[in-house]
Image (cartoon, rainbow, N blue to C red):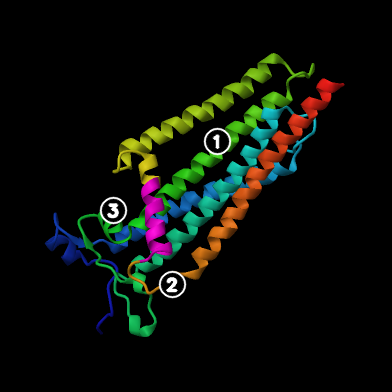
Amino acid sequence: KNMRYHARPTLVQLISLRGGASDMSFQAYDWTVNIGTPATLVAGAALATLLEGGLSEGLRLRRDDKIWVRKAKKLCLLMLVLAFSTEICVVFMSTVMGTVLLTGGRADLSAGGSRWAAFDPVADSPMGLLQREMEFEYLAIGVGFVQGLLNWLVAIGLRFVVQRAADDGRDDIDEESRYLFLGMALSTVALVLFLLSFYNQHLDVRGNYFTTVSRLAVLFCHKYLTPHDLSWPPQPLPLLMLPVLAMALYCFAQSFKCGARRDHVRADTGASS
């Protein structure tokens, strides 16, 4: 019985093409699975930290908080939301791309298959296949996982800083406890710097992490906002996402701005009294 397509290369194909190009779709699928699993763990950890910290007294905004403490709390909550959202995107995209890769690049458009599922599975390596045929998806999954992890670590460090500030002025807290929280915060900063350095030296082929993020932004615009291989107009959902995202950013900005304005009024009132 003839198979419609083969996602996994046969042993004969691998032996005959050893050292050359072969079907790498199944190996690329393994990569998506391997990165989707830890992304799930980071998303769960970020959600747990968000619920525990956001509902506890530690990250609640109080009127007697210092200006920088209030900003640190807001930034900590923002980093946790971004970490959870980013890792969920990674899990979803890696799952979808895994399904596409298992088609072996053979999309039957007449049967309703997606045009994005048609690709050439022959490559020298799985990473070469992904970078050539699915550059946006490859960068989105890789950058999303790293960025979500970094956001979570930054939030953890800010949580230690906020706890350190909350202990100031309390007679029942030893000085060694304050130094302990400060040391843990600085340790997370060192870890973030090391992870970025490790990424730049081992996984990034474009110079550094920030050039990769800029390349991802360009690919996003080309793929969803100004697609050259689809009929005009572009897809409506990305266009609908942009104003919603802009409104969310506006709300975050207003949160920081309102806090700064209230602190300014409080300072003027204190000076006049």
* Element type at mark 3: helix
Q: Which badge, 1 or 3, comes first in the chain's sequence?
A: 3
Q: Which mark is residue 127?
A: 3
Q: Position of residue 158 (x, y in %)?
A: 61, 32
Residue type, label 1? Val
How far apart are labels 1 and 3 at the CA level? Answer: 29 Å
Q: Considering only vertical position in the picture, is 120 above or below 72?
A: below
Label 1 vs label 2, nearer the camera: 2
Residue located beneath label 2 in the image = 233
The residue sitting at 38% across, 78% down in the picture is 113
Q: Residue 59: tell me if it is visible.
A: no
The residue carrying pointer 3 sits among few (fewer than 14), some (14 to 19) or many (20 or more) residues within 10 Å by Cα, namely: some
**Which picture quadrant has residue 258?**
top right
Residue located beneath label 1 in the image = 154
Query: Which quarter of the rendering shows the N terminus?
Result: bottom left
Range covered by the magenta-colored residues: 214-227
The residue sitting at 78% across, 34% down in the picture is 62
Q: Considering only vertical position in the picture, is 236 above or below 264?
A: below
Q: Position of residue 44 (x, y in %)?
A: 58, 49
